Structures are given as C-alpha cells and as structure tokens.
Image (cartoon, rainbow, N blue to C red):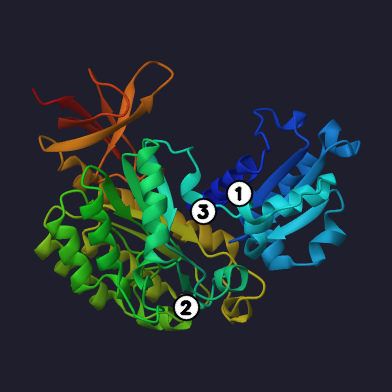
Amino acid sequence: MGCAKNEVDSEHMTARLVEAGYEVVDDPETADVVIVNTCTFIQAATEESIDAILEVAGYDSISSGSAHLVVAGCMPARYGDDLADELTEASCFVPCSKEDSIVTIVDDVLGIERDDYSSLDIPGYKLKRSGLSAYVKISDGCDRFCAYCTIPYIRGRYHSFPEDEITAEVRGLVEAGAREIVLIAQDTGRWGQDFAEPSTLANLMGNLAEQFPETWFRVMYIQPEGVTDGLIEVVATHDNICSYFDIPLQHSNREILRSMNRKGDGDEFLALIEKIRQRIPEATLRTTLIAGYPGESDEQFEELCEFIEDADLDYIGVFAYSREEGTRAYKLDGQIDEDEKLARTQRLRDLADDVCAPRIAGRLGQEMDVLVCGVEEDGQLFGRAMCQAPDVDGVTYVHDCQVGEIVRVVIDDVLLYEMEGSIVR
C-alpha cells in the first residue's frame, strides 16, 4: 500500500524471502503467508490499508488458521502494540524498522528453524524484479517535523544510505533491464549531509550519471532548500539526468508555512523557479500543495491561488489537509470545515489544470526522447518522456516501436496531461 518508498521496501522484503527459499505465488489465497505492507501517512491511506488487511483476513485460508496474515510497514510503526488488540486476525506485526528481518519473522510464524541466518541479510540490489523504470531509496526517515506530517514518528530520524550501497543497487537494477532509475526518499535533497564526511545529492547524481551513461536518472521529493546551485548545475550538464524538479512547496503564504514548521514563502519560491528556468529553460517543475490547512484565511487561500497563476509550473498536485492525531497541527485552532476544505481543494485543482495545460500544449512540435514502457489493452504503445515522472504525470503514446526502446519522437498532439508522438525518421 502507499507510496513508491513502500514499494521499494516491499521489493527488498521479497528479495530476502526469495533468497531464503520462499516462493512468491500469484494467488494470495494459496499462500502460506500473506504480507500486507501498509501505509498510514494520512487517514485515507490508513483506511485503505485496513480494508486490504480485512480483505486478506477474510480468505478461507487465513480465517481457518491454515495460513497466516502478517501486517508490515507504517501502521505497526505508527500504532505499535495497539494494533494487536484491534486486528486479532494478524499473526504478527512488522514495523518499518524490522522489515530487514522479514525472513526470521516469517520463519517464526511458520515454525521453521534454520542454522545460519547470515546469508539471508542480502542487499536489495540482488532483486531481479526490475521493470524499465525502478525506484531506489537513498535515505529514510525525516528530521523536519512538519506540523501536519506523521513521517518522523513512523520512519524515525533522517539517515542517508551509503553511496556504495546505492550504486550497487542501481547496478543490479540496470543489469536486470532498468532503463530509468528514480531516486526517492522523504527528503532527497538532504542526502549525504549526515555522513562523517558530508556529501551532496549533486555529487551522488553526478557520479551515478557518469557510471551509467545509458540510464536515465530522475530524483523526486526535493524540498526547496535542497535545490542547490550544485544540483541545478549537475542536472544541466548531464544529458541522462532528467531536467525534472519535484519540489513540494505545500503553500505560499509565509504565516501558514511557519505554522507548518516550514521555511520560505511565495516570493522565495518564485525566485527559485526563475533560477532553475534561467539555467535550464526546458526544465520541468512539479509541486504539491495543501488546501485547507488550519487557520488558512480566505486571504491566505487567495494568495495561494495567485501564486499558482504566477509560478509557471508544469504539474501541480493538490491535497486537502488531513488532520492526523499525534501531529502538532491536529491541536491547532482554526480547523476548517471538511466541505470548505474540499471546495478549496477542487478550486486549486481546477486552477492548476488551467495553468499547467497550456504548458503541456506548448510541447507541440518539440522533439524529445521517449522510453517505451508498455502496451494498452487495445494494442496502443505508451511511454514517458523525461518531462513525465512515473505514475503522476501522464504518458506519451507512440507507434512503430518496441517496449524497452528509447525513441526520438516529435509531439504532434496533446490532451491535457497526455501526449502523442510520431517517430522522427
């Protein structure tokens, strides 16, 4: 369940289990153990995870006791021992911090004894599941403690993964067929700052781009402070690094941002956007915004609307504020009515479409490379250009090529966020 970071965690657990001799089956109702890797970032995600858990608990094999349900990930990390009282159908709970021990945990559930566990702690790069695009986590945890966010309480304090481990995982995925690597974390821009000998995200990306020159690299979730001059420069000077900046701003009003325990304001963000576009005119910029944060006045909301009109962004994700127990924002005065939050959210989404659609339409006639990713049910080939991140930005439809190729196309049609291209002959 949940985000790409959870997807990577699931892949790593799968790799360890397969290496230990377990077989992954297509039909979960035939499994001896079903693991639900949960998300609980916001209430809607928690509810979705609970629905998945209860669905699995309803399998005949689980209800009869002939198979076992294991609940992993963010829910056990956030709610701890309280889950055992509420979800009695589960055989055990595995918080994020214990996922590396998944083989030992599943062995215990099934009553399997092993003499040697040392070979089971395998690095994630041995996973050979890779598709054409693969996510690689470069750190975990977060030290920001944004007032609305549960991540530090779920994932713990920020810690960067060593560059040699990241490189090894990338190498394994490239060897398995990945054509694009997407670097992810809760806060990618901070990578390397916590080392005894500090490094930077710019250094990491530059080194990876040079070691794997035929592979696309993309980075997501860069907080505004992480978009340094060095990072902009390394993106500008490497053809295989996507000129793509995913910068979650969350709001533009200074007072709201300070209430969120975040830095910056609309003017600073506009200056950052201008700096990126001056150095990389073709850069693609994405952000996320929160509507209906506690205390957001009509005037502050209008300021956010004006910011969207001025910011010249390519993609904007908008989310209604979710009131989460255990966060500082949960207790703030000025909680906004649900209907008003949804109305503000919809207005921002409509405004985002009005602003972003012309930028997408401006790509008509441009030539760009497209990674051909798959085939629709009707036989239509689709892929993604460097300006389209996986899962969030739409796709580019192509013809007369094969899945796995990177082809040069000219964009000859757009429909909101989708594009269609013809092969350049």
The picture quadrant where one finds residue 101 is: bottom right
Question: Amino acid type of disc 1?
Answer: Met
**Which residue is labeled 1 in the image?**
13
The alpha-carbon separation of the residues under discs 2 and 3 comes to: 28 Å
Question: Amino acid type of disc 2?
Answer: Arg
Question: Which residue does the image show at 28% across and 27% down from the upper left?
Answer: 397
Where in the figure is residue 165, as x and y percent of width and height?
Answer: 42, 59
Where in the figure is residue 153, as x and y percent of width and height?
Answer: 61, 73
Answer with mark 1 or mark 3, whichever residue precedes in sequence. Answer: 1
Q: Quadrant of the C terminus?
A: top left
Where in the figure is residue 232, as x and y percent of width and height?
Answer: 19, 65
Label 1's element?
Answer: helix
**Which residue is labeled 3 in the image?**
123
Residue 332 left/right relative to 182: right
Question: Amino acid type of disc 3?
Answer: Pro
Answer with mark 2 or mark 3, whichever residue precedes in sequence. Answer: 3
The residue positioned farthest toward the right in the image shown: 64
Q: Which of 249 and 165 is in front in this view?
A: 165
Q: Nearer the viewer, mark 2 or mark 3?
A: 3
Residue 118 left/right relative to 278: right
The alpha-carbon separation of the residues under discs 2 and 1 comes to: 27 Å
Label 3's element?
Answer: loop
Within 10 Å of disc 3 (Cα), the crowding (few <14, some 14-19, many 20+) is: some
Q: Which of marks 2 and 1 is in front?
A: 1
